[in-house]
Structures are given as C-alpha cells and as structure tokens.
Amino acid sequence: MLDNEKDMELKDKITGVIRELIIYALIIVVCIYVIPQYVIQRTIVDGESMENTLMSGDNLLVEKLSYRVSDPERFDIIVFYPQGNHGSKSEYYVKRVIGLPGETVQIIGEDIYIDGKILDENYGKDPIMDAGIAIDPITLADDEYFVMGDNRTISKDSRSSDVGPVAKSKIAGKVILRMWPFDEFGTLD
C-alpha cells in the first residue's frame, strides 16, 4: 500500500510539473507571437521624414487594438505598410494623419486645404515645397486617409503617387510612446 501511495504521489507531481510547463509555454507563445502581432509592437524610426517630431533611431511603441474598434483621427501618428503587410521584413512608414475618409484634400502653395478650407496645423518642419498628386483635389474613399511626414520637404507620403491615400487595412496602429532616447521618453501628440 505504501508503494502505491508513493507512485500516486509521484504521478501527481509529474502531472503538476507538466501542467506548469504547458502554461509557461503558452505564456511565452502569447508574449512572443500574439502580443506583437495584435496588441503592441516596438518600431524604430528609420529616416528623417518625421523630423522634428521624431528622429531617425527613435524607438516607439505602436498600439494595434484601438483602430480595430475606432478610426484614426486627424493628427494621429500612425504606422502603415504602403504595400500591405507581408511579414516581418515589410517596409513600413511612420506618418501623421492629415485627411480623413470622405474629405477632399488639396495643397495649394504651402497650405493644406480640407474640403476647401485651410487646415490649421503647425506640424510641418519646413513649408511644403511640392504638392505632388495633391496639387489637384483628392477625394478620399470611405476607408482612406491622407498622411504626411512632418518634414514636408523630404517625406515620401500621400503626396507621392507611389504611396497615395492609405487604406485603413494597411494601417498597423497608432504610435503611443517614444521609449528611446530616454531624454525624449513620453507620449506623442
């Protein structure tokens, strides 16, 4: 009878250890794969198109849930995949939302017009020198956004025919926090 009790005790311990290992493995899978894919991810700015707001090398946190239940708002800083998301090596852009679905965007001189009215904003590092495709009015579809970099002279954004208006389905998420450099740590506006 003692051997039988010891065997049962040993079996219970082994079962408990296996159960714990399975739980830890599931937690690791969630942390490595699920959270970065669907909840939050780290992104590094590569280039000068968002200066002076963001600098090349800045480490950002991008939140991915809110745009599943709500829409981007004007002046949000977003991350999007201009050619769609094709895995971890996809090229992504970090830009600011300027025009919203259904609006007509046009750039005349240094001014951005939304539905015929000058947009009151001061995010641009330099004056707009090239209107690109927005020299003519662009009416955005129900799921499209017009985005621009804050460094208006060098940014490849919705003014470029290579990028154009950005479909909501190509938006990965909203930039919510700069983590690096530490002296610039904080939320973005």
Image: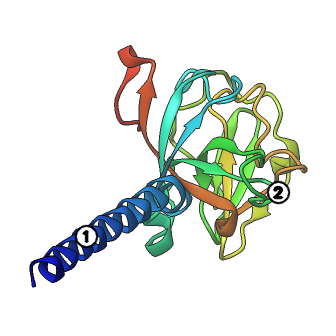
Amino acid residing under circle 2: Gln
Q: Where does the image place residue 46, in percent across and percent down from the top left?
A: 69, 28
Q: Which mark is residue 83?
A: 2
Closer to the eye: label 2 or 1: 1
Q: Residue furthest left?
A: 2
Q: Where does the image place residue 90, in percent across and percent down from the top left?
A: 77, 49
Count of numbered badges drawn on the protein: 2
Choose top left, top right, bottom left or bottom right for residue 31: bottom left
Name the residue located 37 percent from the left edge and 62 percent from the top edge. 21
Q: CA distance from mark 2 to mark 1?
A: 48 Å
Amino acid residing under circle 1: Gly
Q: In the depicted view, which residue is nearer to us: 25 or 19?
A: 19
In the figure, is residue 60 to the left or right of 79?
A: left
Name the residue located 54 percent from the left edge and 25 percent from the top edge. 58
Q: Where does the image place residue 84, in percent across and percent down from the top left?
A: 77, 61
Q: Where does the image place residue 38, in percent across and percent down from the top left?
A: 51, 63
In the figure, is residue 74 to the left or right of 15?
A: right
In the figure, is residue 30 to the left or right of 173?
A: left
Is residue 118 visible to us here? no
Is residue 104 visible to us here? yes
Name the residue located 63 percent from the left edge and 21 percent from the top edge. 56
Task: Quickly name the residue at label 1.
Answer: 16
SS for dot 1: helix
Closer to the N terminus: mark 2 or mark 1? 1
Q: In the depicted view, which residue is nearer to us: 10 or 115?
A: 10
